[in-house]
Amino acid sequence: MTPRTVTVRVPAKVNTQLSVGPARPDGFHDLANVFLAVALHDTVTVTPADDLRITCTGPDAAQVPLDRTNLAARAAELLAARHGIEPRVHIHIDKDIPVAGGMAGGSADAAGALLACDALWGTGASPSQLLDICAELGSDVPFSLVGGAALGTGRGERLTPLEVGGTFHWVFAVADGGLSTPAVYREFDRLTPDAPEPAAAPALLDALRTGDAKALAATLTNDLQAAALSLRPSLAETLAEGTAAGALAALVSGSGPTTAFLCADAEAAHQVAAALTASGTCRAARATTSPAPGATVLTD
């Protein structure tokens, strides 16, 4: 008996290393992208409907497209097409991941919708088949499906799971407005015309494996940070405030404008979040942990 409603929880991500190579002929960039899933989540609920439609609630829901340009709708369409099904489904997204914030919220919703529709329709798709659809949807979508920690190569879609030896404590400062990922990459290309080929840093992988927050702090890198700061100079003040409040390290999350602060423990994270909130340099600050599981079915 097929379920009538399926709800999936899916995590945000932070890039502990984002090394970006030169632009490829197809317009993408080769990456060494060390993903870490964090315990900020969207939930995606699907129910049968007369036609494909999307609704959204939560912070910044008004910024989420509700037509078929939404990656969650595209995920339903691709899965349905592969199995000869009409994508007649209502997809409801309950947002908690910042929109256009460099934390893969749209990609998370796509992975959540894909897993939920797979369960709703009983397609029996294998994990590799789902990952193939994820890769077609976007560079960050495969990791949103699997979660945990992984090295993404190619344009980020080819994943190698990574071992994480403990819990890391983070604060994410949400900025007003978003940043366009394509615009940040264009600015990266302007600022870095001779970008080297990307490679994962052994010291960072060791820090993840051993669960050493101080070692991880010393190795965090984001090649898109200079481009994001060029387009949004005010982020530098947010980074400085979090560092002054005791964060072990601070960086722009992905293409921004959310900023990420690695902290020594839960108490330090709450102190940094409070200081950032009081500073007025961000709209909100959230303390959370990593790693987190990937897309997970909650109800069916």
Image: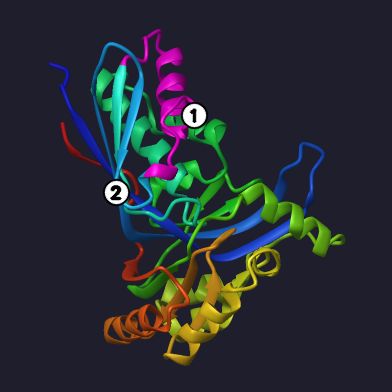
Amino acid beneath label 2: Gly
Q: Position of residue 276 (x, y in %)?
A: 40, 80
Q: Residue at the far right: name it.
A: 194
Amino acid beneath label 1: Ile
Left or right: residue 198 versus residue 130 is right
Q: Name which quarter of the figure residue 285 lies in.
A: bottom left
Q: Is residue 147 visible?
A: yes
The structure residue drawn at horizontal position 76% and vertical position 41%, both measured from the top left corner, is: 27
Left or right: residue 7 versus residue 232 is left
Q: Name which quarter of the figure residue 151 lies in.
A: bottom right
Dot 1 falls on a residue whose secondary structure is: helix
How is colour applied across the structure in the image? Answer: rainbow
Q: Position of residue 37 (x, y in %)?
A: 40, 58
Q: Which residue is mark 1?
A: 133
Mark earlier in primary sequence (1, 2):
2
Q: In front here: 33 or 245?
A: 245
22, above or below 291, in the image? above
Please count the marks in the image: 2
Q: Quadrant of the N terminus?
A: top left
The label shown at residue 58 is: 2
Q: Which residues are magenta?
A: 62-88
Q: Residue at the far left: name it.
A: 1
258, above or below 132, in the image? below
The structure residue drawn at horizontal position 52% and vertical position 57%, both measured from the top left corner, is: 102
The structure residue drawn at horizontal position 43% and vertical position 40%, both measured from the top left corner, is: 64
Q: In front here: 40 or 49?
A: 49
The structure residue drawn at horizontal position 43% and vertical position 78%, both measured from the top left corner, is: 280
Dot 2 falls on a residue whose secondary structure is: loop
